[in-house]
């Protein structure tokens, strides 16, 4: 195993983290943050940059090309590099929270894991305990701007994936394909790469991601969001489907219907495969309506939104936004409220305008959990199982049911009029089983680690592995995770990273066979 390659990639990612911390520090300086906060960010940046440059110089001296016939080694290095990068980022990305915001180490790890995994779950609330037993006065609104910007930047980095940045700068050692397969979420081989070279694909994808972010930021700013700082932070979180906001009342802080409809559209588009947007930009081909996965995803959104809207309109319940403002009992307002929450949860963004736990609708918890598990489309920044996997599992299950009636039938699983290879079908079925098993284990462990009921534990597990953020019961959209014990926070931090890297990339590292040379 080429450990120098892994060290080299990790050093590049540390350099990126250090540059990001410097950017957050400059934003904080411009916005007038205290010198104590700026010194904390500066020290964190210096530490990351020094460690990064030292590791990079060492690895450059020792780096060597792979010899022919080492393909299996390259595969293992690609997986281990991704694993290493994300968990190093988890530690280093928490330094600004500790030294700039005086978070406790466990809270810093949780907030960083939630940021880079684009989960959006937070421990920040009014009255939370900081390092040294100091009490935080006020919620998100009172935090330094450097902290808020760093949270948004973690979301944005995590959305596109740290390794995608590395692929732009690292067309060496022949491991690009395996890094791409370990990092990019969704089903493999269903969507062809836009170019034959993985580094070019990464550059084009990053360019598309950055352009789409700029479009959303500008739309937010000129359609009702108060200032550029809020527009940039919420734009980063929206495109990354991360959900970190700047206010305790989340998106209810922006009462403009136009801003909320823009957020709904942006979250939905960000949940679709980035390759479809890339083909639209490069070739002018609008293929969203031709993609089976996208059609199914939008069908779920429309169906669940219609169910909630009709129920809210017929019940006549008095609803409120998260800031306490009454929601008018008008069809547009109710449809917007339902659509916002449905798109936010199925895209695994986690923004909220209203506390859906107060809606008191029949079947609401079950529907919400189902769309949280489903998630967005493959090749997007969303979490969850991914719609493509849900389709493959469903079609394979139907095929097996048909075989009970016609034993000699050999059904094919088709997606976008193309046959899905059986190895990929088996991998997808295995993913679904592991998804259920990990969720079950996490659900059973959480009540022992921190006092909570089953509903809270189950929704916490689903929310963490699907990278959603809010859940049910004690972790609803109006609550935070601050009340949990340190072991529970560490467990959920690990599950969030496991979910972001799509289970296999992390769990395979714990197999003894992974470390065998032969």
Image (cartoon, rainbow, N blue to C red):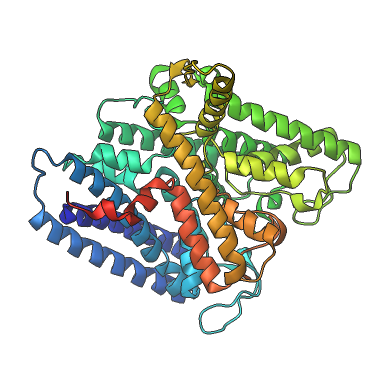
Q: Is residue 151 visible?
A: no
The residue at the point 86 percent across, 43 percent down is 328
Of residues 107 and 12, which is closer to you in this image? 107
Q: Is residue 232 above or below residue 267?
A: below
Q: How many marks?
A: 0
The residue at the point 43 percent across, 60 percent down is 24
The answer to which image quadrant residue 211 occupies is top left
Where in the figure is residue 291, as x and y percent of width and height? 51, 21
Where in the figure is residue 5, as x and y percent of width and height? 18, 52
Where in the figure is residue 95, as x and y percent of width and height? 40, 69
Of residues 216 and 332, which is closer to you in this image? 332
Q: Is residue 140 visible?
A: yes
The residue at the point 42 percent across, 70 percent down is 38
Of residues 5 and 255, which is closer to you in this image? 5
The residue at the point 70 percent across, 62 percent down is 474
The answer to which image quadrant residue 449 occupies is bottom right
Q: Is residue 188 above or below residue 321?
A: above
Q: Is residue 159 above or below residue 37?
A: above
| Side (left or right) of 253 relative to 277 | right
Where in the figure is residue 72, as x and y percent of width and height? 20, 42
């Amino acid at each position: 195993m080429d450990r120098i390659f892994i060290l080299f990639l990790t050093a590049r990612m540390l350099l990126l983290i250090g540059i990001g911390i410097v950017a957050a520090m400059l934003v904080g300086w411009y916005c007038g943050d205290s010198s104590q906060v700026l010194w904390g960010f500066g020290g964190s940046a210096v530490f990351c940059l020094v460690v990064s440059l030292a590791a990079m110089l060492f690895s450059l001296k020792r780096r060597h090309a792979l010899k022919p016939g080492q393909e299996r080694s390259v595969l293992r290095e690609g997986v281990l590099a991704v694993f290493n990068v994300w968990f190093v980022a988890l530690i280093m990305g928490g330094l600004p929270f500790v030294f700039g915001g005086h978070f406790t180490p466990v809270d810093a790890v949780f907030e960083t894991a939630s940021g880079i995994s684009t989960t959006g779950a937070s421990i920040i609330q009014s009255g939370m305990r900081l390092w040294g037993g100091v009490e935080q006065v006020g919620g998100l609104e009172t935090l330094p701007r450097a902290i808020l910007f760093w949270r948004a930047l973690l979301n944005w980095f995590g959305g596109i994936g740290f390794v995608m940045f590395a692929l732009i700068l690292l067309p060496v050692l022949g491991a690009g394909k395996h890094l791409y397969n370990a990092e990019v979420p969704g089903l493999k081989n269903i969507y062809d790469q836009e170019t034959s070279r993985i580094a070019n694909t990464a550059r084009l994808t990053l360019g598309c991601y950055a352009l789409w972010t700029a479009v959303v930021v500008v739309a937010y700013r000129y359609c009702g969001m108060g200032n550029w700082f809020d527009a940039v932070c919420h734009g980063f979180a929206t495109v990354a489907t991360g959900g970190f906001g700047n206010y305790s009342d989340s998106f209810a802080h922006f009462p403009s219907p136009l801003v909320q409809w823009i957020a709904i559209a942006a979250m939905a588009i960000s949940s679709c495969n980035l390759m479809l947007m890339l083909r639209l930009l490069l070739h002018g081909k609008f293929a969203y309506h031709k993609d089976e996965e996208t059609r199914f995803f939008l069908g779920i959104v429309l169906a669940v939104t219609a169910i909630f809207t009709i129920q809210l309109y017929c019940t006549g319940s008095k609803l409120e936004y998260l800031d306490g403002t009454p929601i008018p009992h008008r069809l547009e307002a109710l449809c917007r409220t339902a659509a916002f929450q449905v798109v936010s949860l199925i895209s695994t963004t986690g923004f909220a305008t209203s506390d859906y736990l107060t809606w008191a609708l029949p079947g609401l918890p079950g529907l919400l959990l189902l769309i949280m598990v489903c998630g967005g489309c493959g090749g997007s920044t969303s979490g969850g199982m991914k719609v493509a996997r849900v389709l493959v599992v469903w079609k394979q299950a139907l095929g097996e049911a048909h075989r009970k009636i016609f034993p000699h039938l050999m059904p094919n699983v088709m997606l976008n009029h193309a046959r899905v290879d059986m190895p990929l079908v088996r991998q997808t079925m295995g993913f679904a089983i592991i998804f259920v098993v990990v969720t079950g284990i996490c659900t059973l462990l959480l009540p022992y680690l921190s006092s909570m009921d089953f509903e809270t534990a189950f929704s916490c597990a689903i929310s963490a592995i699907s990278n959603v953020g809010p859940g049910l019961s004690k972790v609803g959209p109006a609550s935070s995770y601050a009340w949990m014990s340190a072991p529970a926070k560490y467990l959920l931090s690990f599950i969030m990273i496991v979910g972001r890297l799509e289970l296999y990339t992390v769990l395979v590292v714990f197999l003894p066979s992974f470390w065998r040379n032969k």
